[in-house]
Image (spheres, rainbow, N blue to C red):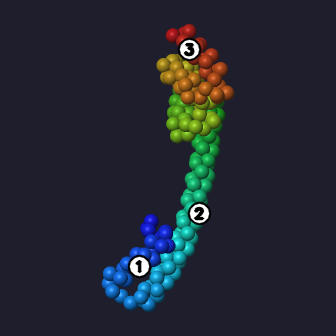
């Protein structure tokens, strides 16, 4: 294909083909014209196909972005509902699923802005139920992975409070 990009190489190959087979030169010019036409047609079709492929790729990326945003929104709504239920009923049966949802959210959407907030909330809930080890793990995760988060000071203070109790 590299040879076909250069017109002189292309014509040389065709001429060589004809000379090796001892074909008539008038057939050579006719074939050369037909091949140029077919190559031009192929280039046009190929460029249309590439344009179509790019368009399909852009649409797929946009749809996956929208689907991902919708999933994030849905998960946040579920967590909000669970938080409301746990606030009304602070029993272990409501808190553990909420903590699990916090951690699942952070696992699935690690770069999301709510991830450090949910990790902090999970750590606080672990602290309230007396599971200090898990609370420390999640607080250290915030300090390590999210140094620019708004809950950084709270994470430091909570970690210090847990460590003074232990």
Q: Is residue 108 above or below residue 119?
A: below
- Disc 1 on helix, strand or loop? helix
Q: Marks 3 and 2, how far apart in space?
A: 54 Å
Q: Is residue 16 above or below residue 87?
A: below
Q: Residues within 10 Å of mark 3 (few under 14, many from 20)?
A: some
Q: Position of residue 155 (x, y in %)?
A: 61, 21
- Disc 3 on helix, strand or loop? helix
Q: Position of residue 74 (x, y in %)?
A: 61, 45
- Disc 2 on helix, strand or loop? helix
Do tag 2 and tag 1 residues touch (Cβ < 8 Å)? no
What label does residue 162 carry, if any? 3
Q: Earlier in the sequence, mark 2 or mark 1?
A: 1
What label does residue 55 carry, if any? 2
Nearer the observer: mark 2 or 1; the answer is: 1
Q: Residue at x 61, y 26 (%)?
A: 147
Residue corresponding to mark 1: 14
What label does residue 57 carry, if any? none
């Amino acid at each position: 294909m590299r040879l076909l990009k250069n017109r002189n190489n292309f014509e040389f190959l065709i001429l060589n083909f004809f000379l090796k087979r001892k074909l008539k030169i008038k057939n050579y010019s006719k074939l050369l014209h037909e091949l140029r036409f077919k190559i031009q047609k192929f280039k046009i079709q190929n460029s249309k196909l590439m344009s179509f492929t790019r368009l399909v790729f852009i649409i797929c990326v946009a749809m996956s972005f929208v689907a991902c945003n919708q999933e994030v929104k849905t998960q946040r709504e579920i967590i909000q509902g669970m938080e409301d239920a746990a606030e009304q009923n602070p029993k272990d049966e409501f808190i553990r699923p909420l903590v699990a949802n916090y951690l699942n959210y952070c696992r699935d959407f690690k770069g999301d802005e709510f991830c450090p907030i949910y990790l902090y909330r999970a750590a606080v809930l672990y602290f309230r139920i007396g599971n200090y080890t898990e609370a420390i793990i999640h607080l250290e995760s915030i300090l390590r992975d999210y140094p620019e988060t708004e809950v950084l000071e709270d994470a430091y203070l909570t970690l210090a409070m847990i460590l003074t109790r232990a």
